[in-house]
Image (cartoon, coloured by chain):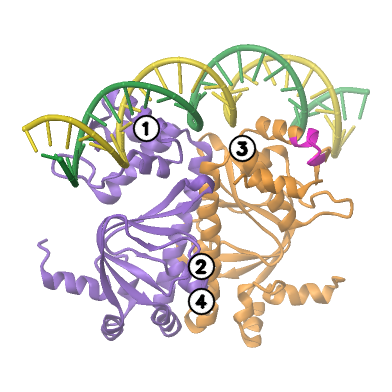
Chain colours: A orange, B purple, C green, D yellow
Amino acid sequence: MNSTMEDNFLLCKGCSCTESSIFNSLSSEDLDYIDKNKSINSFKKGDVLYREGNRISGCYCVNSGILKIYKTGFDGKEQIIAFAQKGDITGYRSVLSNEPACTTAEVIEDASICFIPSSIMFSFVKKNSDFALSLMQLTCKELNQANSYIKDIAQKTVRERLAEVLIMLEDTFGKDNEGFLTISLTRAELSNIVGTATESVIRLLSDLKNDKIISISGKRIKILNKNELNKISNPY
Amino acid sequence: MNSTMEDNFLLCKGCSCTESSIFNSLSSEDLDYIDKNKSINSFKKGDVLYREGNRISGCYCVNSGILKIYKTGFDGKEQIIAFAQKGDITGYRSVLSNEPACTTAEVIEDASICFIPSSIMFSFVKKNSDFALSLMQLTCKELNQANSYIKDIAQKTVRERLAEVLIMLEDTFGKDNEGFLTISLTRAELSNIVGTATESVIRLLSDLKNDKIISISGKRIKILNKNELNKISNPY
DNA sequence: CGCCTATTTGAAGTTATTCAAGACACGTGG
DNA sequence: CCACGTGTCTTGAATAACTTCAAATAGGCG
């Protein structure tokens, strides 16, 4: 799959690069309409699309790059709730509910992102019930994931959750040709997903390395024994 | 507000007992249509409406009584995700996504509950965009709550979460004329909300009692100093 | 090279869990 | 009415898991 300029244009036109994209339920004319009303912007690592508590006037569709979506606790510690990559949409919750953003969206890998104004989202929800249903199903899916994660964070040990997160990162973002996780996260970010202290993540990664379950090269991580990692994550 | 038979009928007709009910966006005819197609059933404490992993053919609207909604972890430990009381609707996620239930719904206070078949939900989503939007907003709200709870469970101590849960229980279910929490939960259930061991909840409740922040009479709990409880829950 | 930040390690301390045992409450049957 | 059983609640003690603080090391970048 060779990405050309044209591909990128088509991709962004409806952000319909994945089968699960909610924009798949829109007609070609609808997509054209979005295309005329959206804007495309480039963002650099560290840029913030929207911050928790701020009002936003539309939602964002990721064309390329990666975002981290997080909530901020007291003393500023962030809890990463989700990531958004190519084809994912974010900010729609605040748009639909007309409420301030409940999370912060920050770029962790340089990104190209479409902005779709609220009015368009609302008009499509109103006139296209399939689109509305897709959007609902997307929300439901995220809700299920959130609930599962509540259970895991409440019941699993840090070690178990770390194993789970590593698997999720490989499944979601893939690995490069050397087998290392594609996504590049700091230890602090990793700890902000798992919900623990940075030092704990470091120690546990080190343990996993000693057990030959992963290998570490600088900040890059390679999963050597996914099966074992799965067992750690799900110790039935 | 004196509840009469007629009130109860009207209540259940559209389950529109709360301002936030999604059924408020339906017309009188639509409500009539639901009324003809729904069924009303009584349930006893301990009854299970649906179990995690099972397919369900409609959603449930609580007329009276209380449900606990939970996920089950390995070794069978349950994590309570939410409660449903008068006016709340549950099971709609599985209906909309046409997937097996991702939680179990169990009665913890004798309940009267309407069952609304999937087909009706879908037909209203299709033909009434306001209804669809209401449903989406409800899902979004639950998603926000779930994300907040992930943050809390990851970052707060058990003591802080217990304080938070006690406040939530009073705010959600109210207190009786003596000031005790209306909802009756076992210590085990309390621990399954907070996400900790039963013994930990017992010890921390005992601490709160010694600090005169709550009082305990058997399994009944009274919040004496809500302000202080809030401070514990939010130690900025 | 030098600075800054991220990572790693150690040691001490805290928090929470686990296991075991006993107390209490409630309902049932004698 | 009491004895009994069952389940919930409580307490104690030992242990395990995790955090915190401090300090050292390694990497990246101007």
**Magenta-span inclusion, residue A210:** yes
Percent position (x, y) of residue A140?
51, 65
The residues tagged by marks 3 and 4 sit, at their Cα atoms, a distance apart of: 38 Å
Q: Quadrant of residue C4?
A: top right
From the viewer's perspective, is the residue at label 2 or at label 1 nearer? 2
Residue B100 tag number = 2
- The residue beneath circle 1 is B231
Same chain check for tags 2 and 4: no
- The residue beneath circle 3 is A158
**In the rendered view, would you say A151 is above or below B218?**
below
- The residue beneath circle 4 is A132
**Magenta-span inclusion, residue A197:** no
At 48% from the left and 51% from the top, the residue drawn is: B72
SS at mark 3 in the image: helix
Same chain check for tags 3 and 2: no
Q: Quadrant of residue A192?
A: top right
User: Are the residues at dot 1 and dot 3 in contact (C-beta closer than 8 Å)?
Assistant: no
Front residue of D17 and A118: D17
Percent position (x, y) of residue A155?
52, 42
For the residue marked with disc 3, what is the amino acid?
A: Val
- Of labels 2 and 1, earlier in sequence is 2
Q: Which residues are magenta?
A: A208-215
Quarter containing the N terminus of chain A: bottom right
For the residue marked with disc 1, what is the amino acid?
A: Lys
Front residue of B207 and A11: B207
Percent position (x, y) of residue B94?
48, 69
Residue A108 visible, this angle: no
The residues tagged by marks 2 and 4 sit, at their Cα atoms, a distance apart of: 21 Å
Percent position (x, y) of residue B176?
17, 45
Tag count: 4
